[in-house]
Structure formats: C-alpha cells, structure tokens
Amino acid sequence: MGTAFVLEKKRINIPKYWINNREVENEIKRFNQALRKTKDEFNRIKDRICKFEGKDQISILDSYNMIVKDDMLVKDTLASIKKESINAEWALQKTLDQIKETFLKIDAEYFKERNSDVDYVGEQIIKHLVGHKEELFSEIPKDSLIVSHDISPAETAQLMKFKVKGFVTELGGKTSHTAIISRALEIPAIVGCPLAVVQIQTGNTLIVDGEKGIVIIDPTDKTKKDYELQMRKQVETERMLLKNIHLPAETKDHKKIRLSANIEILEELESIKEHGAEGIGLFRTEFTYLNRETLPDEEELFQQYKTVLKTMYPHYTTIRTFDMGGDKIPLNYEYNLDETNPALGLRAIRLCLKERTLFKTQLRAMLRASIYGKLKILIPMVSSLEELRATKAIIDKVKKDLTKKEIEFDPNIKLGIMIEIPSSVMIADLLAKEIDFFSVGTNDLIQYTLAIDRSNENVAYLYQPLHPSILRMLKMIVSAALKEQIEISVCGEMAGDPLCILILLGFGITELSMNALSIPKVKEIVRSVEYDTSRSLLERILELDSAEEIEKFVRKELAKILGPVYTKYISLS
Amino acid sequence: MSKGGKVNWIKKELKIGNELGLHARAAAKLVKLANRFPCEIFIRKGESMANSKSIMGLLTLAAGKGSVINIEARGEEAELALTAIEDLINSKFGEV
C-alpha cells in the first residue's frame, strides 16, 4: 500500500537525416560504438543480477546480448546506412520496424511478445546513439508505487536503489522478463494491467497485491485495515531482523567479529548505517569509470572517496583499486579488449600496472582523501610477488610526489590484497610478509578454483562454496595470515551466507564483509554460537569429502545450535 | 541461397519436443551452438526460414512444441554441426 507515482516515459526524438559519402564511415563507427555501449550496460546489469542468483534472469541478459549482435539487426542497419545514405538512428529505426513487422505476423502469443525484447534492446541502442541520459528515476519519491506503461527488466533492477514499494505496468505478461526479475528482487509487481496509466493518477492511494495479482485504487477503509494488518505483520518481521543492529557482533564466548559492508555506489551509505555495519570491507570503485563519456578526474574521485571516508569515520573504509577489464571496460578505453577469456585476461591489477597514469590518478585521489577518515587500500587479483612489489613501488612513488608537493595524506594507511586466485593462495605465506591484510574474495576464488563461470547456466550448479577444495584453500590462507599476524577478512558472498558463517568463524576469521542487508541475520547467527564449538565442528567438517556431505553436516549442526533462528534464516537458503 | 556454384546442403528433419518450444532460452542455446561452427546453418519451418546464428530469426519461426523443422547446413564442418544441433534438440535443450 502506498501512494501512486505515474511515470511518464519521455519519448526520444529520433533524428533523421541524409548523409554524404564521406560521412558513411563515421555513422558506422557511431553505430558500432552504440552497440558496444549497450552490450557493456547489459553486462553490468548481469553482474548486478548475478548477486541475486537466478538462472532465468541471467539468461535474459544473455539473449539481449545476442540481439545486440544479431545479423538481422546489425547487417541490415549497416546496409541501410551505406545504400540509402541515411544516419545511424534512422537506419536502425527502419531495421527495427521491419523486425517488428515480422514478429507481428506470428500467431503464437509467446513468440509475438518477444518483440518487446527486441524493441527494448533497440531503444537502448538508440539512446546510446543520441546520447540520451537516463534520468527517469531521479524524480521518484521514496516509498512510492510506480505506475507506468512499461518498465524494462533493466529498469526493474535499478528500481531497488530507490526503495520503490512496488509497481504496476500496462504491458507484459506472466512470461514477461520484467515480471521474472521483480520476483527475484522481491518487489511486488503487477504487470499486464491495461489502462493503468489512464485510471491511476499520481497521489492515489494504491494497494498492490503481488500475490493475488490485484491492484486496488483508493481502497475503502475496511480493505485498508485488512491490508494494514498484513503489512504490520511484515514490518514486525523486519523489525525483528533489525533489533540486533546495536548489539555487538560477538560469539557467546565473547569472540569479537567485525561485520562490515561491501558497497559500489555512494547511495548505499545510508543503508550501511541502518544495518549496523562496522566499516566498509570492500568499496568497489570501478563503477565510477563505466558507462560515461570521459574518465573521472582526480578531483571527482577525491570528492567521492572523501565523502565515504568522512561518513564512515570512526570506522575504516577499505577502498579497492579499480577492478576493470574483463567485461568491465570504460567506454572510451583506447584498447580493444575483445578477449576470448576476459576472466583470465587483462583485468584488475594487471590493467592498473599497464595503465599507470590511470592507476596513479586513483591512488592520488585515495591518498588525498585519507586524512578525512581511516583508509585501507586493497589491491585486486594479485597473483605473484612481482605484481605486488610493482604495485607497492607505484604507491611509494605517488606518496613521494605528494610529499614533494606538500600535500597531506595519512602516513599509516594499511595496504592489503585480495586473495582470489589459487596462485595467491599457494604463496599466501610469501605475500603475507609484505602487506598488512588479506581480503578473501570467495566469489572469484571459487570460480577460478573450480574452473567454472557461474553465469554460464550449463555449469552454474558446480559453483559450490562448501567444496572441500575451497575449505582447504581457506585453511592455507588463514594459517599464512596467522603466522605473519596480519588481518584477514572475507568479502565474498560466503561472508553473508548463513551456511558458511560457522565455518568462517571456526577458521578464526575476524572480519566478514557483505551486502549490508545481510548483516542483521549474520550478526544473529554469530551471537548464537560459541567460537569454541565452531572450531571443533570445523575440524570435523574438514574431514568430510564432498560439498554435499559438508552442507548436510552444517545444516544439521546449525539446526541444533541455533534452534528457532535456524528456521528463520537458514532452512530456506 | 544460391551463393557459389555447387550446392551441397545437407538436411535433416526434426521435431521440437520440449514444452516451451524454441523459446528465448532454447533459441539462445541454439545460437551459441551454431556459432561454434564455421558453416552456414539455416532452419526452415514451413514457408519461413531463419539463420540459426540469429536469435531473432529463430524466434520469428515461432516453433512451438511439436513443430517440425528442417535444418540445412553447408560448408566446413556441416555434418558435425548438424549432429550437434540434432543432439541439442533431441535432448530437449536440457529442459525437463
């Protein structure tokens, strides 16, 4: 229940003009660039969605990516540009119209509806061609119910940022991808509600019952009361979850654990506080570089880092240097990184070491911001000592430059590395001698160790955090850290996964960094167990020989230890 | 279709057996597979024909459950491609 906000889609004006022969090449270049930007954007959305799992949602974005490079779309458009001497937008529009015609001839409803996917992809490409900036959501008041003619799946994924309570769209059906994604994000939604935009006005009181699939406009007092009761029950559950945010995260036998947050964008800072995070264990900085025409300059980065550091003080902020490359490439990046194996290619620290100017700019911004809070610097994807030493040399150089220019920075910034490649696990003892902390990135570590890409639906089932190999890796990392007495945290999804907490505790890991939303439930689990018990259980777990057995064992023990907490958080996961 | 002089298309008739037919996800799988082969591969259903390397083409075939389709391949590794696609379709695209 909430207040309706009717979202009017701004129509994009498609420029149409003739071009001369000399301009053909440029139009083709523009078209290809727009295709690449569109693909990059889809990949970014896919990245985000991967966190909420769901094979269906991921495969939707795969099919979008296929449409972007589909012959029917690309070849025809290129041909129109050349033969008819028209601009890229016009040529693309013509192709889209043709495709639409073909789809409309189809009888079967499901296939007919797929034209909306093509339409959506086409719209995105055109937006990139005309340089349309998407600011559709900036005006949405918090807690409102969105009513719109259509909301694309990609927009649905963005909606969660704005704390939208739910939405109603005119278009779409049960098989609509928007419906699938909204279910994954737990946003109540009614799709395929004809004339919604006409019948509902901004300011109407609405009840959107996603379960029953009904919308009630300006409900009677009686209906309101019924729904209010239902909602109160829900709020109650949420409050239960948040009741422990002020309590310390420590085990029953008083072993203190630090629960910190992973963030990508500044908008998340508020949620971090609400969920009781003690610091930021991972600030992914690459998002500032993507999806824009020019790279951010030092000043912009500095302001951003300063805001985060100031907001988090007295807690610390761990900023990870940009992890670009792979499928995350800045738009105007001069190299064409069309790699066959992006996950094994020029990315993260490898790219930093190659693009030193870019890297130094970021480091300077971080160092300058360091006096406004407590900064830790984290280096992604280190695989050898040489890489680490080369990186340290660059950091030292930047520090010297700043000192020479009498620019102030915190002299005691801690430096750490992500442990996310098997090679770094094997030499963790050597690496530990040269830095202040380890942060275990379990997502990549699992993928590299088990040699699987979890966004590939054929092998996604092999993504097993509880695989004995992963536990053995963790053991090696922890013992290297203990020996050199450096700090160690886990910042991958395992840190927020109820089934893994017991194990991570047992290893003696003292910091877990996760999506802020997971903190309350992880804290409740931490507070329900004894460190000693987790240690002895881990010994037994390490003797088991398959992920399946380990999971069975963990579930059984957790149920015993946690009692009702178990049913609340774990039985469903 | 009349590219080159000699036409040596190899063909196969198949029936789509999975519940949802050649829907988006199945079509995506087929495109991915077809792209692994250097040969030309077309799929014909009744009057319409689609390039198997184009997801939109495949979708516009609207091949629901029970549709009979003809796969036609020509060029390098054409036979391999045909067998692979046959396997994929017969395994119902790995769907239940």
Image: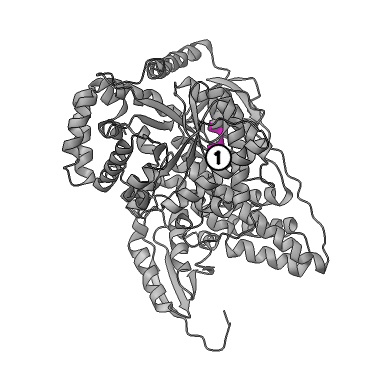
Q: How is the image coloured?
A: one colour
Residue A205 image-quadrant placement = top right
Q: Amino acid at mark 1?
A: Thr
* Residue A212 visible somewhere in the drawing: no
Looking at the image, which is closer to me, A286 or A137?
Answer: A286
* Residue A89 visible somewhere in the drawing: yes
- Please provide percent x and percent y for residue B9: 47, 81
Residue at 44% across / 21% down in the picture? Answer: A276
Looking at the image, which is closer to me, A554 or B92?
Answer: A554
Residue B71 image-quadrant placement = bottom left
Q: Secondary structure at mark 1?
A: loop
- Please provide percent x and percent y for residue A283: 51, 35
Chain name for mark 1: A
Instruction: State whether residue A152 is above or below residue A316.
Output: below
Q: Which residue is mark 1?
A: A285
Q: Which residues are magenta?
A: A155-160
Decide whether residue A501 is among the magenta residues: no
- Please provide percent x and percent y for residue A37: 63, 52
